[in-house]
Image (cartoon, rainbow, N blue to C red):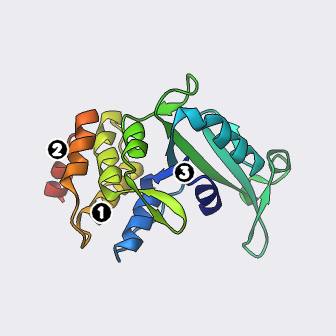
Amino acid sequence: MLRVGRELKEKLVLVGGWATYFQAQKLGSRSLPSLDIDFVALKENFRTIEKHLLANNFTPVGFRYIKYYHETLDGGLKEICFEESKRVPPYELRELFLDILWDEKISPISFTHPYVKIVFEKELYDEIEGVSVALPEVILSMKFLIEKNKYRGQKQLKDLVDIYVLTVSPEELDFEVFKLLYSKEKFDLNWVVQYFKEK
């Protein structure tokens, strides 16, 4: 993930759980990384990004990219290609998922997000460890929109943990960034407030 993020830092911005993890570290706080990697990107950079991912052993599967690893007896992970993955027993196979949210549809099954274009236009990201990482206000605003998807379970719980980590950080949040994003797509805090009231 770090290699991809560093080599494509002008074309990809890290969001989601891993972005929360890096921002929390920067703020002297703690967070759990995510199981998958989420980036945002502009449609105009699709060919460059996909070419880079394919050259780095990522396999496109539906709307996401997967990299395969063979877990060795000593617990190490050896990167393998898709063809090799077919010969590995399932209990020794590990998968790394990379998802990209675009400003415009790349294909009928790709995902877009209303904040992508403005993230790039206004440079709403920091460089952390050589990777472009979305500002805490962007991560939070994206998570505030999640309720529209109406899912429940562990993923929603992880989103709420990320929200908590970023809102109790020692650094003040910039409400101008929230206003800017809200003007592009209105988010709702009621579900977040309700959850923390109940707990």
Spatial CA span between label 1 and label 3: 24 Å
Residue drawn at x 43%, y 44% is 120
User: Mark 2 is on which residue type?
Assistant: Asn
Left or right of 70? Residue 127 is: left
Spatial CA span between label 1 and label 2: 17 Å
Q: Which residue is mark 1?
A: 166
16 and 105: which is toward the camera = 105
User: Counting other residues with Cα less than 10 Å from the Cα at mark 1, is it few (<14), some (14-19), or many (20 or more)?
Assistant: many
Residue drawn at x 43%, y 52% is 16
Residue 190's tag is 2
Q: Position of residue 50 (x, y in %)?
A: 67, 40
Residue drawn at x 79%, y 46% is 82
User: Mark 1 is on which residue type?
Assistant: Leu
Q: Secondary structure at mark 3?
A: loop
32 and 27: which is toward the camera = 27
User: Counting other residues with Cα less than 10 Å from the Cα at mark 3, is it few (<14), some (14-19), or many (20 or more)?
Assistant: few
Q: Which residue is mark 3?
A: 10
Left or right of 135? Residue 61 is: right
Task: Give the foreground label among 1 and 2.
Answer: 1
Position of residue 22 relative to residue 91, above or below, is below
